[in-house]
Amino acid sequence: MAHLRRDAKEHTSPGCYIFFSVFFLHYETNLLYIWFNWSAVDALRAIRGSLSDPLGRLDNWNRGDPCGGNWSRVICYNVTASDGYFHVRQLELLRLNLSGTLAPELGQLSRMKIMDFMWNSIGGSIPKEVGNITSLELLLLNGNQLTGSLPEEIGFVPNLNRIQIDQNHISGSIPKSFANLNKTEHFHMNNNSLSGQIPPELSRLPSLVHLLLDNNNLSGYLPPELSQLPKLLIVQLDNNNFSGSSIPSSYGNITTLLKLSLRNCSLEGPALDASGIPQLGYLDISWNQLTGPIPSGKLASNITTIDLSHNRLNGSIPGSFSGLPNLQRLSMENNNLDGSVPSDVWRNIDFSGNRSLILDFHNNALTILANPLTPPANVTILLSGNPICTSQNQLNISQYCQSTSVVVPGGSTNNDTLCPPCSTDLPHENILRSPIPCLCAIPLHVDYRLKSPGFWDFVPYEAEFQHYLSSGLSLSSYQLEVSTFMWEEGPRLKMNLKLFPNNTALFNSGEVLRLRDMFTGWLITDSDIFGPYELIDFIPGWYENVLPRRTKSSLTTGATVGIVIAAFAAAAILSSLITLIILRRHSSQISKRRNAKKIQMKIDGVKDLTFEELSNSTSNFSDSALIGQGGYGKVYRGILADGTGAAVKRTQQGSLQGSEEFFTEIELLSRLHHRNLVSLVGYCDEDNEQMLVYEYMPNGNLRDHLSAQAKEALSFPMRLRIALGSSRGILYLHTEADPPIYHRDIKSSNILLDSKFVAKVADFGLSRLAPLPAMEGVAPGHVSTVVKGTPGYLDPEYFLTHNLTDKSDVYSLGVVFLELLTGMQPISHGKNLVREVVAANQSGMILSVVDTRMG
């Protein structure tokens, strides 16, 4: 290695350092693009283009690095994937007042885990391409205006945990393919227009916990097979039309079930015997056409709500409803029940504190009062509409025979305090339960909803809820305050929460981001009693302007630039001479190019070959003659009739050009003559066949000789000659070709080696003509074009602006020089060549990346 250090001193010139410094400072704001999957940027722009953003929340989705913290609500992985790129992990577009549609390009974000478009006004259908996001775990589309049917393709997303599409206008049936979602725990599809039969195939889902399909147009029968779901906790199917169907008796054997709600489903037959469900906490089968007696089996001791109202049930009220210690509501109204009024349902219930009990028996046929009614004060009994109320005065039950309705209570925090008001210069509030008296702090606000709670009255559970949620958020209990709560249709419980910092006036920004991630990532463990939750809004409020941009790296842009400059200075062992040649000749050649006049193009020395000739030369295009393949087609080694070796590039059917366009390309290529360019020797243009014939390069391409599998490594002098030769070929294209040409796809596999290892630049299939001078004699300096090229070699500025310049090729050539220096590929097995050189230089180990096989 000593001679490498000596050569570095001899060959590194001030001009080289100036070149690299100017070059990379020019790209300093875009360096991270080297490590971001550029095709995903196009996808993000397409996603942005399909949305209407009246508040301009996504205006910065057109500049900088999506994973560098500059693109709002785009969150990336902190490390690169196996392809060497950073990838989008999460789109967090919650409540941004967006409309428009969801773009099919979402499917190109193949490593995304969380897709969150909740609470906007987005219309159109869900793109089937979402099924291509194999890493997707959370599909969060609720609260929009989506229409159309559910794509079958979603049923093949192997890691999907949560489908949350409720509160849209989605129609059609539930795809049977959803039975393949082995990791899905949450089906939240309520409040749509889904129709048809619930697929019995869903019984194969091994992980399903919550099945929320209420408020749709589902019909057919209730599949008995759902009782086979091994982890099912909640079934909520209210307000569908299962006309003529009965409740399968097998539902009484779902031993895991916590809540069963089948309200207003047009069900017939007997009431379900739920006494075999050991943990059942909530049973609602009201507003159906159920008949027969009420099953007499004892229900689970933790049940809070039993609603059998508005059916056609008859017989007496079983005594098994007595002694249920957690019961809050027993609703039997509007049936045909007769016999005695229960007089001890409240037995074993502790009414201390704020516990209450509602017993609603009105509009039945109850006639007997076996024992006097002496309930505790917190018990409400409703008997109006029963025959027994005709004797209410004699039986002393008149207070129970009044026509009254009971509304489930909402509530708000009592803010009464003896503390002085907080200062008003900032939005401080008193932390009511803080261990430090009268502590003022700035809270975070969260709008939150319990989607299927397991109780009728929240008040007795408020303290338990505060403990549950604060623990789930890793906060002390006093840091969480339920500011208000109110019941909504469902029933669902909406609440406004305040989160306070821990014994200080302010959250630090990292804690705000952590809490937001807990809510938006659904990282709070579900509770049996509180059921599934949903985030309606996370409101940073005052903290909005102090939150840092999300980023993956602790390096500043300036530090990154410095590291890259230093690393490339080390690479000057190979590149200094080439750089100086380009710098010295570039200005004079530009003048020559701009003053040149167009001349008539003629084919000179290019053979017009027939398909038969080329077929014979390649043994009928046999696989044994195949030496390469790309997007354009295949390349075969052939021997022409005069014995000359040739490389035959056969264009595949989808890439054929018109004859005039093809002939124009041949004319252009025929005039490119340079020792370091692969020469065109012939062509074929027959029906459905277009082929270009180049001189054959017996030593293959540079990439193969740099690989670890190469039989003989290239020496340092050989590598230097290859670098010089390839740079001369590119310099010719830029400054001496008429018209000048930008290559657009310079890479080591496009640098071929002849029998004497002379480097020749190949493959101009992606090339573009450089700009010609305008009438005033000044060229624009770039060509606007669709980005083409190979990841790892792509010029960041070209990628950002779509403006192709000669510097774009020079950048790609610089990456090839690093390959010559290190032997590494630009991207391989999760390693990025530029990043590896940066890391080596940062650790003072720059020579550790030099290819020791150079001798």
Image (cartoon, rainbow, N blue to C red):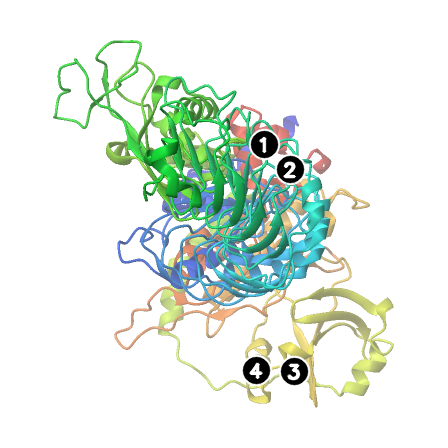
**Mark closest to the chain's N terminus, 3 or 4:** 3
Task: Compare marks 2 and 4 and give the one earlier in the sequence.
Answer: 2
Of tags 3 and 2, which is closer to the observer? 2
Q: Which mark is residue 296?
A: 2
Q: In this rendering, which labeled residue sits more in front, label 3 or label 1?
A: 1
Q: Earlier in the sequence, mark 2 or mark 1?
A: 2
Determine which residue is flagged by label 1: 319
Crowd rating for badge 4 (residues with CA inside 10 Å; few <14, some 14–19, many 20+): some
Residue 804 in sight from this viewpoint:
no
Give the CA distance from mark 3 to mark 1: 106 Å
Residue positioned 40% across, 67% down in the render: 784
Type of amino acid under label 1:
Gly
Label 2 to label 1: alpha-carbon separation: 8 Å
- The amino acid type found where label 3 is placed reads Gly
Q: Earlier in the sequence, mark 4 or mark 1?
A: 1
Distance Cα–Cα, label 3 vs label 4: 11 Å
Judge by depth and name the residue closer to the eye, 828 or 332: 332
Secondary element type, mark 3:
loop
Which residue lies under the disc numbered 3?
605
**Are discs 3 and 1 less than 8 Å apart at CB?**
no
